Amino acid sequence: MSAQRPRFPLQLDKLATTKRPGTIVPSVVLMSNIARQPGPSTLAVPQIVDSRARRADMVAKLKAQGMTDTVVLDAMGTVERHCFVDSGLGGQAYEYTSLPIGLGQTISKPNVVGRMLELLRSGHKGPLSRVLEIGTGCGYQAAVLSHIATEVYSVERLRGLHDRARENLRHFRLPNVHLILGDGMLGYPKGAPYSAIVSAAGGEAIPPAWIEQLAMGGRIVAPTVTAAGKQALVVIDKTAQGIRQNVLEAVHFVPLKSGLA
Ligand code: SAH
């Protein structure tokens, strides 16, 4: 299957090959419905002392390091990151560290989340409308996105994490977050076109489906293996003149994998 995907750098003449056998129809869970579903009455929210102050410190540090987008900074200052990690790790939730979220996956460092969301917004005039996130993980970034976009579609291929994110997000009651169990390499056509697509997992190339489902004027931010064989942050802009691609700094994200597990 990987032979069908274009190698990096992206070649537009190969973008028509999206149809693959065994395509999984994703199941969609609307957060507005989740809030009404019966479920465990108690949510294991790790106790940390004055999380608001911890978030304010995190935001101050992000600003000191050059982040200027107040919309992203405010969103990150609002979402209670410690609610998304294991209770034993709650104390580290606001540190500059990636943390395990189960099934061998990690939640990115706050500065990496901030950087990617700032890049997403800077590629767009006005507020973001529909955004596709690949790799829901624990749901943290989806929660931050819910504050900066009109609708958030977040796809996760691991059922355990999809369920976990649904539990984590239940507490926040975010009607504009839609969680999908599916293979994000296929995007999520039902929500398209997207004004932005952000991936929390790094592939060998930008999947053609993402380009197809991106609105004109939209932007993709995704870790991708470059010609040098190393993962870097790649920004793709879809313009009337064609696809523009910029390779930015080196990053270390978990791999983008196909299929469900
Ligand atoms: N944004 C997440 C980070 C999750 S880590 C958060 O805030 O917690 C990246 C996630 O991408 C992992 O959960 C991994 O399972 C998922 N992933 C990898 N390949 C994928 C694919 N093809 N489709 C959907 N999710 C994928």
Image (tube, rainbow, N blue to C red):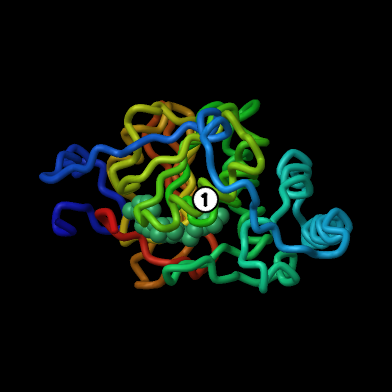
Please state the horizontal and vertical placement of residue 13, each as a whole percent of the image: 20, 41
Looking at the figure, which quarter contains the C terminus? bottom left
- Please, is residue 189 above or below residue 143 in the view? above
Residue at 61% x, 34% y: name it: 174
Residue behind mark 1 = 165
Along the line of sight, the residue nearer the viewer: 24 or 33: 33
Along the line of sight, the residue nearer the viewer: 167 or 63: 167
Residue at 40% x, 26% y: name it: 193
- Please, is residue 184 above or below residue 61 in the view? above
Q: Within 10 Å of the Cα at label 1, are there few (<14), some (14-19), or many (20+) other Cα atoms?
A: many
Looking at the figure, which quarter contains the N terminus? bottom left
Q: Is mark 1 within 8 Å of ligand 1?
A: yes
Residue reaching furthest left? 21
Please state the horizontal and vertical placement of residue 178, each as a whole percent of the image: 48, 35
Left or right of 211, for residue 40: right
Residue at 54% x, 71% y: name it: 100
Please state the horizontal and vertical placement of residue 43, each as a whole percent of the image: 64, 52
Q: Is residue 233 visible?
A: no
Please state the horizontal and vertical placement of residue 86, each as a whole percent of the image: 61, 67
Q: Is residue 104 visible?
A: yes
Q: Quadrant of residue 103?
A: bottom left
Q: Quadrant of residue 83?
A: bottom right
Q: Which residue type carries mark 1?
A: Ala
Ligand 1 quarter of the rendering: bottom left
